[in-house]
C-alpha cells in the first residue's frame, strides 16, 4: 500500500488561481483522479486520468503532474468552488487510495 | 441516465447486523465494477472494497477484509454492503460508486450515501 499526501487547507480570493497538490511515490506510474465534495453531498469526479475533465465540469478546472506530485488547478476561483477536494490513485481496479483531502476556502 | 440509489439511514446498536444497498439504473448493471467507500464523521474517504457484478469477483481493502461482506443481486440490479456485528466505530457515511471508464479505477458515478449510526 502507499500514501497520497495533500495539504489540509488552501485559501484563495475569488478570481484568483487555486492549486491543490497531491504527492505520492506511485504517482509517476499511475493516473490521478480528483473529486470535489461539497458539504452534505457525495463526491463528484472532476478530473480523471490525470488531466481529463469530467463531463459538465467547468474549464477552469485542470489537472497536471510532475514527478511524484499531481496538481489540481482552479483558475478564476468562484465562491461555488468552495469544497473539499480529494486526490485518488490506484494500481489496480481493487486498490483505490485516497489522499487525506484539502479544504478549499474562498475568502 | 446512470443512477445509483442507496438505502436509507440506519440506526443500530453495537453487535447488531446490517445490510445496506445500492441500486443501479440507466446502464447494464453487470458491466461495471461497484465500489464501496467509507467516510467517518468529519474525515476523508476510505476505499473498502469492490465487486464485479458480471462474475461476482469481490476484492477487499486489507483494512476492511474480514469486517464486511460485499455482494450483488443481479436480478434486481443491486449491490450490498453488510456487517455481521457492528461496532460504534462503524458509524459513518457509506457511498457506493461505479467505475465506467476503461482501465479507470475511480468512481465516476456515486450514490447519495447511506448514513449508519451505531450507538448503544
Image: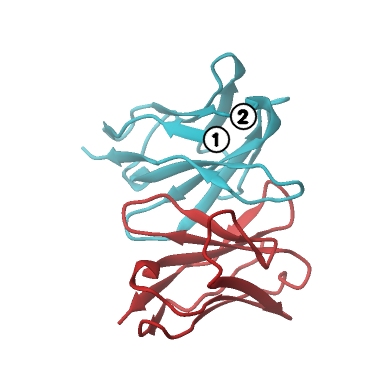
Q: Nearer the viewer, residue A6 or A49?
A: A49
Q: Residue at x 48, y 67 (%)?
A: A100
B55 w.r.t. B102: above or below: above
Residue A69 left/right relative to B102 = left
Total numbered labels placed on residues in the image: 2
Disc 2 is placed on an element classified as loop
Q: Position of residue B5 (x, y in %)?
A: 44, 32
In the drawing, what numbered circle is on residue B2? 1
> How far apart are the two marked residues, 1 and 2, measured between alpha carbons?
6 Å
Q: Chain of mark 2?
A: B
Q: Position of residue B95 (x, y in %)?
A: 46, 43
Q: Residue at x 58, y 24 (%)?
A: B72
Disc 1 is placed on an element classified as loop
Residue B3 left/right relative to A88 = left
Query: Quick one: which residue is furthest to the top in this view?
Result: B75
- Chain letter, colour cyan in render: B
Q: Position of residue A57 (x, y in %)?
A: 53, 60
Residue of label 2: B27
Q: Nearer the viewer, residue A39 or B2?
A: B2
Check whether the beta carbons of the residues at disc 1 and disc 2 lie within 8 A of each other. yes
Considering the image in quadrants, where does the N terminus of chain B appear?
top right
Amino acid at each position: 500500500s502507499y500514501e497520497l499526501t495533500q495539504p489540509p487547507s488552501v485559501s484563495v480570493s475569488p478570481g484568483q488561481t487555486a492549486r491543490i497538490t497531491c504527492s505520492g511515490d506511485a504517482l509517476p506510474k499511475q493516473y490521478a483522479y480528483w473529486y470535489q465534495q461539497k458539504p452534505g453531498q457525495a463526491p463528484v469526479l472532476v478530473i480523471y486520468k490525470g488531466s481529463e475533465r469530467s463531463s459538465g465540469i467547468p474549464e477552469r478546472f485542470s489537472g497536471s503532474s510532475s514527478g511524484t506530485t499531481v496538481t489540481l488547478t482552479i483558475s478564476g476561483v468562484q465562491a461555488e468552488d468552495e469544497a473539499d477536494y480529494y486526490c485518488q490513485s490506484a494500481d489496480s481496479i481493487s486498490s483505490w487510495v485516497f489522499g487525506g483531502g484539502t479544504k478549499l476556502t474562498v475568502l | 441516465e446512470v443512477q445509483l440509489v442507496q438505502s436509507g439511514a440506519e440506526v443500530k446498536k453495537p453487535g447488531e447486523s446490517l445490510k445496506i444497498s445500492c441500486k443501479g439504473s440507466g446502464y447494464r448493471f453487470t458491466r461495471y465494477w461497484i465500489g464501496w467507500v467509507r467516510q467517518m464523521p468529519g474525515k476523508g474517504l476510505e476505499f473498502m472494497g469492490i465487486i464485479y457484478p458480471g462474475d461476482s469477483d469481490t476484492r477487499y481493502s486489507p483494512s476492511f477484509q474480514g469486517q464486511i461482506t460485499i455482494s450483488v443481486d443481479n436480478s434486481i440490479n443491486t449491490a450490498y454492503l453488510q456487517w455481521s456485528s457492528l461496532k460504534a466505530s462503524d458509524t459513518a457515511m457509506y457511498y457506493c460508486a461505479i467505475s465506467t471508464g476503461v482501465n479507470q479505477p475511480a468512481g465516476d458515478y456515486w450514490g447519495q450515501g447511506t448514513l449508519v449510526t451505531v450507538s448503544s
